Structures are given as structure tokens and as C-alpha cells.
């Protein structure tokens, strides 16, 4: 009887802590879910997916995946994870289970796009990872990081498929400035991510710790190791890590599970059709998106979608060799009109500004003229190097057609230093 009472007291004392831990784990999974859905929804609204998936049927589930998953014994999930041929330990515990359940819930209506984008990107990811002798399964980090959205930007400024911060990206050779952001370049960012993961593994000697450091930085992982008394295992330093990082490794394992075992959960995706067979050419002279669009008959939004690293709608080829990705069907047109595109791009980017003669006097500003200026509702914009009508329209909340009408323009061509009326 005494033993029973003692056991009951222990259970009553432990139960609140256990409940709190379960709630905590679920909250971390929810945080990851919110980040995933935000990045995914942004991706789904992108030009390419809007154009090519509007008539595609969504996948269906034969069963209620949440309910069915709750009925699966832990041993089954653990066995499936163990059956994967991976270098990274696919640990199974309640944290991982919470994230698998989250993905089954959140990815159920999004799996079509994830699987299609995996086909589109995986060979690129695998090539970069292999170059640095990094495990192939780390390609699934892009699902956790960005929902495979090259234009994803976090609240703290991380960008691209691999969510590089500005400083880390620069340290690994990614060019980031007002014209180009190579964190959004799928090829270069994948190479940088593989290099970074390789270096982190050399530091910690453990892939779970390297993955955690990729998320929160090696400094935070070292602090967690110190606070744990020198433990060198992710699950042992788990309580000492930042909250987001505690959910990061479980989310990675869960994403790996879902992308390999979705059929076992009754999910039968109807694959999205992306008829984008693309080629890449290296450009060594300046090219503006407006002139590429004009001469080869491709929507400027599609050029942006395929080349998300260019922030100012032009390729600064005169400063080096930069890639231009286009549908394969447009490559002959590009070759045929290359000189015209180069010529018109140079005209729009390098037009000489008007020079005021030194002895020219400025008209005096009278009280009346100043008053008239204040009462004038018109606004003007001075064209900067690299700007286009579309980028100026976006900046001022108007449209290209309105800008052309206000300024009596017959084409999209504008000059550096030109003064445009925007309102």
C-alpha cells in the first residue's frame, strides 16, 4: 500500500512536467509549421507556379492522415527511419514524432509542389553536397529552411533556398549588394551551403551538431555544450539550445521521413507539371530584363522567377561573368538578338546625364514659385543606374503604363539621370 501511494505521488509530481514537455514540443513543431507555410504560400504565389499549376489537380489522401498516424506504433516509425540508407542518424523520439505529424498535417495539401521541386532541384543539391563530401540527405534541409522557395526571406534577413544570413553568405563567396543577391542563386547558394556544412562537421565531428550550428551558429552550439557540462550529443544539449534550434534537427528528420514514406500514409500526389526545361548561359556584358523580354518574347516576371538573384532587373555582366537562366525554347532567340539586347541595355544603363554649365545661374526662388511648388501634387523620380520602368513603378505603387502615359514615353527605354513624373 505504501509503495502504491509512493508511486502515485511520484506520478503526480512528474505528470505536470511531462505534460509541459509535450506541450513544449508541440509548440516548437507549430513554430516550424508557421515558418514552412509562410515560405510555401509565398512560393505558390510566385509567377512560375501560378502560371503552370492553375489547372493541375491536387493530390488526395485515401485516409485521414492525422488520425491514422496517431494509430501507428512508435516502433513502426522508428523501423522505417532506420531502414533509410543515411550517414546521419535518423533518431526517433517524441520530438521527431511531433514534427512528422506536423508535416503530415501541413504538407498534405502541399506535397505536390514539394515533390515536383525536389525533382527540379535535387540533382543540383546532390552535386553540390557530393563535391564537399556531405551526406546527400541534407538536401531535405531546404524544406525546413525555405519550403524550397528561392525567394524566401526570414524575419531576421536570411534569404534563399538555404537561408543564408548576409555575413555568412559573404564569407562563403556569395555576392550580396543592391544589384545582385547570390543567396537566391540556386547553384551558388547550394555550393556555399555544402561548403559551410562540411566546415561545421569538421568543427563538431557530429552531423546533428553541425545541422544545429547551421541553424543558430557554431557559437550558440558551443555555449550549449558548455552549459551541459561538455556533452557532445545533440539530444543531451537539447535543453540548452535556442528554442528554434531545438525544433530544427527534429524537423529535418521529419522532412526526410515524409519525403521517403508519404505513400505509407495514404498520400498519392498528382504531380504538378512544370514545363520549364531551362538552360543557362554566362553573360559578360550588361543585360536588362526589359530588353531580354522585348527581344525574345518572354514575360519579365518569368525572367525574374528564373533569375531571382538579380535585384535590379539587370545582369551586371561588365563586372564579371554572370548566369542567365531561360526556358530552353528561348535560347535560339537570345542568341539571335544578343547584340540588340546588349546595345539597348547599354543605352538604358549608360546614358550621359545632363551637365549644367558652370556659369549658368539658377533662377531665383520667389515666395510665389515656392508656394506653387508646395501646392503642386506632382512627384518626380530621378532614374538611377540599373533601374527600369517596372522597378520604378513598383517602388512608387503605380504601373508601367501609367508611367509611360505621364511621361509621354513610346517605349520602355529610360536613361540614367532622367527625371520621370511618377504622380
Image (cartoon, helix red, strand yellow):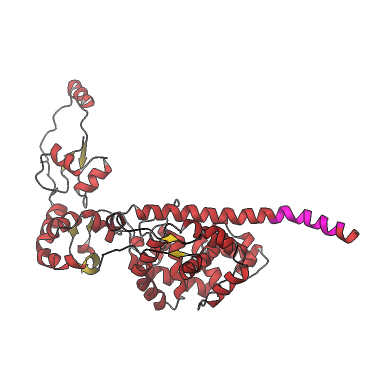
Name the outermost residue toward the right: 1
Q: Classify residue 119 by image quadrant.
A: bottom left
| Magenta extent | 5-18
* Residue 212 inside the magenta-drawn segment: no
Give the image quarter of residue 56: bottom left
Q: What kind of secondary structure does the magenta stretch mostly adopt?
A: helix
Residue 127 can be seen, yes or no: yes
Q: Position of residue 54 (x, y in %)?
A: 30, 54
Residue 345 position by quadrant: bottom left
Q: Nearer the viewer, residue 287 or 251?
A: 251
Q: Is residue 49 left or right of residue 406?
A: right
Residue pictured at 35% horizontal, 72% vertical: 124
Residue 174 x %, y %: 35, 64
x%, y% of residue 264? Answer: 50, 69
Quadrant of the rendering where the N terminus is positioned? bottom right
- Residue placed most toward the observer, 286 or 70: 70
In the image shown, does 404 or 362 lie closer to the viewer?
404
Horizontally, residue 219 falls left or right of residue 44, namely right
Q: Nearer the viewer, residue 115 or 334?
A: 115
Residue 111 location in percent, x, y? 42, 61
Task: Assign the C terminus to one quadrant of the image.
Answer: top left
Rendered residue at 57%/60% (across/down): 98
Residue 164 visible in image: no
View extreme (top): residue: 368
Amino acid at each position: 500500500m505504501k509503495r502504491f501511494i509512493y508511486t502515485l505521488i511520484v506520478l503526480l509530481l512528474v505528470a505536470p512536467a511531462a505534460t509541459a514537455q509535450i506541450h513544449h514540443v508541440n509548440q516548437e513543431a507549430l513554430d516550424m509549421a508557421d515558418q514552412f507555410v509562410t515560405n510555401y504560400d509565398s512560393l505558390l504565389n510566385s509567377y512560375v507556379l501560378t502560371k503552370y499549376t492553375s489547372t493541375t489537380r491536387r493530390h488526395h489522401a485515401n485516409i485521414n492522415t492525422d488520425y491514422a498516424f496517431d494509430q501507428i506504433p512508435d516502433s513502426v516509425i522508428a523501423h522505417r527511419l532506420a531502414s533509410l540508407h543515411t550517414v546521419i542518424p535518423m533518431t526517433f523520439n517524441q520530438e521527431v514524432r511531433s514534427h512528422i505529424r506536423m508535416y503530415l498535417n501541413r504538407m498534405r495539401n502541399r506535397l505536390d509542389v514539394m515533390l515536383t521541386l525536389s525533382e527540379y532541384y535535387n540533382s543540383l543539391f546532390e552535386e553540390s553536397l557530393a563535391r564537399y563530401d556531405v551526406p546527400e540527405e541534407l538536401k531535405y534541409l531546404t524544406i525546413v529552411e525555405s519550403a524550397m522557395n528561392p525567394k524566401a526571406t526570414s524575419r531576421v534577413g536570411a534569404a534563399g533556398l538555404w537561408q543564408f544570413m548576409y555575413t555568412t553568405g559573404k564569407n562563403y563567396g556569395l555576392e550580396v549588394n543592391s544589384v545582385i543577391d547570390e543567396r537566391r542563386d540556386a547553384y551558388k547558394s547550394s555550393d556555399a551551403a555544402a561548403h559551410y556544412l562540411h566546415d561545421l562537421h569538421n568543427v563538431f565531428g557530429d552531423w546533428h551538431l553541425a545541422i544545429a550550428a547551421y541553424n543558430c551558429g557554431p557559437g550558440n552550439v558551443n555555449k550549449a555544450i558548455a552549459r551541459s557540462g561538455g556533452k557532445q550529443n545533440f539530444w543531451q544539449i537539447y535543453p540548452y539550445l535556442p528554442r528554434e534550434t531545438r525544433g530544427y534537427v527534429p524537423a529535418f528528420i521529419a522532412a526526410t521521413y515524409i519525403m521517403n514514406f508519404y505513400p505509407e500514409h495514404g498520400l498519392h500526389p498528382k504531380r504538378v507539371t512544370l514545363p520549364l526545361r531551362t538552360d543557362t548561359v554566362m553573360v559578360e556584358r550588361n543585360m536588362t530584363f526589359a530588353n531580354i523580354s522585348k527581344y525574345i518574347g518572354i514575360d519579365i516576371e518569368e525572367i525574374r522567377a528564373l533569375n531571382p538573384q538579380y535585384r535590379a532587373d539587370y545582369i551586371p555582366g561588365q563586372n564579371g561573368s554572370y548566369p542567365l537562366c531561360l526556358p530552353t525554347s528561348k535560347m535560339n532567340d537570345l542568341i539571335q538578338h544578343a547584340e540588340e539586347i546588349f546595345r539597348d541595355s547599354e543605352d538604358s544603363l549608360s546614358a550621359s546625364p545632363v551637365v549644367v554649365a558652370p556659369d549658368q545661374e539658377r533662377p531665383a526662388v520667389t515666395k510665389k514659385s515656392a508656394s506653387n511648388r508646395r501646392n503642386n501634387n506632382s512627384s518626380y523620380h530621378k532614374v538611377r543606374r540599373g533601374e527600369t520602368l517596372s522597378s520604378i513603378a513598383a517602388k512608387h505603387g503605380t504601373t508601367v503604363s501609367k508611367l509611360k502615359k505621364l511621361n509621354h514615353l513610346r517605349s520602355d527605354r529610360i536613361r540614367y539621370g532622367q527625371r520621370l513624373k511618377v504622380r
